[in-house]
Image (spheres, rainbow, N blue to C red):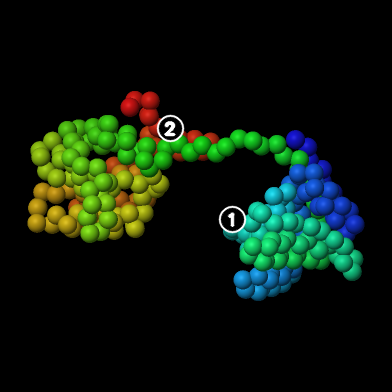
Amino acid sequence: MAAEHYDSPDAETLANVVETGLHEGAIVTLQAECEVEYDGRTSGYLGPGDRLLVCKPDGTLLVHQPDGHKPVNWMPAGGTVSARESDGDLVVVARRVNPRERVEVRLIDAYGVTRYDADDAAEYEESGTEDEMHAYIEAHPNELEDGLRIVEHERETKYGFIDFFATDADGNPVVIEVKRIQATLNHFDQLKRYVSLYEDNDEVRGMLVAPSASERVRRALRDSGLEFVELAEFDRDATGTTDAKLSDF
């Protein structure tokens, strides 16, 4: 892995770094004031502004504004990215044939360009998925509550599939909705709909299971006579890994 950076490069240097870098399999990033034109399924124009451009050797081009995680303009892999000098400015063009699309970025003022010879053959492996969470709960219902017994997994209803239909230690029915992420008000509404299917049974309970929930969600659950169970085994730590006791299966 190696990286080369050039501050305030001229158009000739920019074009050379982009063309040579992409041809040799490097990632090239540019920090610049630029304007963008798109022509393809529709057409569009983005006026001048300070942006980050990411050019990849597979034909991907990303144009990022200072805010937000999504690019404001982009071209997916499968096409080509090229650079040329035009009237003293660098013009970066990404195009593909099917569908026929073209993104042209004209750099008005270039602040920097970086060539990054990255080496990454690893494949992303996700752990702690919702399926694994379901399997863990099915194998360890007592983690949610002592005496809890799973009756049915993925019970079909007119509102969708209830994750778990269970009974508690006293034999009361328990409707369980499981979420892999922090519980939201939408998840609360979903559980409430499921529980309403059994409103003729005064003893029915509703349980929302997730790694965490805001106080607002917890309060909404309490006010509706529903419950929240925190299953911290599936919460991500600061490194982005998941601490799940899947080896207990």
**Secondary structure under badge 1?**
loop
User: Percent from the top left, x then y, of residue 176?
Assistant: 24, 46
Seen at 81% across and 63% down, the residue is: 91
Using residue 62 as the reference point, say whether residue 193 is left or right of it. left
Q: Residue at x 70, y 54 (%)?
A: 59
Q: Is residue 43 visible?
A: yes
| Mark before the other along the chain sequence, 2 or 1 | 1
Which label is found at residue 181? none
Q: Which residue is mark 2?
A: 243
Q: Is residue 223 left or right of residue 3?
A: left
Residue type for callout 2: Asp
Residue 137, percent from left and from top? 29, 36
Spot occupied by residue 135 in the image (x, y as percentages of width and height): 32, 36
Q: Of residues 189 and 220, which is closer to you in this image?
A: 189
x 76%, y 40%: residue = 117
Instruction: Count how many numbered circles sit on residues in the image.
Output: 2
Above-or-below relation of 222 to 239: below
Q: Disc 1 residue type? A: His
Q: Which residue is mark 1?
A: 69
